[in-house]
Amino acid sequence: MDLGISGKVAMLAAASKGIGLATAKMLAAEGCQISICARNEEQLEAAAAEIGGETRSYVVDVSNAEDLAWWHEQTVTDLGTPEILVTNTGGPPAGNFTEMTDEQWQSGFDSTLMNVVRLVRLVAPGMEAAGFGRIVHVTSLVAKEPSALLPISSTLRSGLMALTRLQASEFGANGVTVNCVLPGHTLTDRQRHLAEIVAGKEGITPEEALAKRGAETPVGRLGTPEEIAAAISFLCSVPAAYITGTNLLVDGGLTKGLG
């Protein structure tokens, strides 16, 4: 399928590895001009080389409003007005609710929720003026099934589902769609980190914890970044123009709820 987005400028946050990098590679293969950000310059440069094409990389802390404004400004200068935005971050700190500090909650709020608010405020005017825009927020299945290990993530990502609906309603008349992808257990650095925490609590190895996570899903395995990226990329496409306000689970059938 031709996604119809060749030549469009795509901004992808936290795209030096994992789901962000896999999505950037897919959008580049569709002919997009890619702008990626992350905090680690060395990883960014390696990612940009792997993506190839018209990729530009910028060292940015997504929890910092000034950094985000600078990234957007540089992208407009170097590539043009963004027509695609994929918001994506590493997860907030993990641990039981009683272990989480005010500082950890605030950090999670800035990096997981406020970065989405700020980035959409930056890109939406240009998208509306052009009459075309695709915004996809990458969150987690814990938005629908809260995890005791991830109280901050569960709380904030549930809020992002509501924000997605609100943004879709506000921008839809001007050709801008806003959707949310909720990955399940996907083999990324974040998943490996969580496996180490679970392993310590349960007295098993991280490898056993990962295998257990995979076995819990109906498909019997962990997802791959590329499988999540495929869903994100379709939502960025021209054929997906009538899909907006959706919170799409890509979790191998793990989530049991109907809502």
Image (cartoon, rainbow, N blue to C red):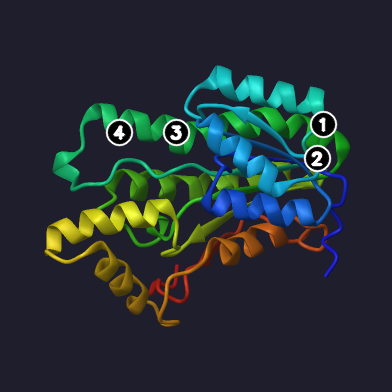
Q: Which residue is mark 1?
A: 79
Check disc 4 and give the amino acid type: Trp
Q: Which residue is mark 3?
A: 111
Camera-near label (4 vs 2) is 2
Q: Residue 54's mark?
A: 2
The x and y percentages for residue 194 are 30, 54
Check disc 1 and give the amino acid type: Leu
Check disc 2 and give the amino acid type: Glu
**Which of 190 and 248 lies nearest the eye of the viewer?**
190
Whether tag 3 and tag 2 are in contact, CB under 8 A, the answer is no
Q: CA distance from mark 1 to mark 2?
A: 8 Å
Q: Residue at x 63, y 28 (%)?
A: 58
Q: CA distance from mark 4 to mark 2?
A: 37 Å
Whether tag 1 and tag 2 are in contact, CB under 8 A, the answer is yes
Camera-near label (1 vs 3) is 1
**Which of 42 and 125 lies nearest the eye of the viewer?**
42
At label 3, counting other C-alpha atoms closer than 10 Å, the crowd grade (few under 14, some 14-19, many 20 or more) is some
Q: Which residue is mark 4?
A: 105
Instruction: Give the vertical position of 183 relative to 160 (above or below).
Output: below
Instruction: Give the vertical position of 156 relative to 63 (above or below).
Output: below
Q: Residue 236's mark?
A: none
Q: Residue at x 54, y 40 (%)?
A: 14
Whether tag 4 and tag 2 are in contact, CB under 8 A, the answer is no
Element on which disc 4 rests: helix
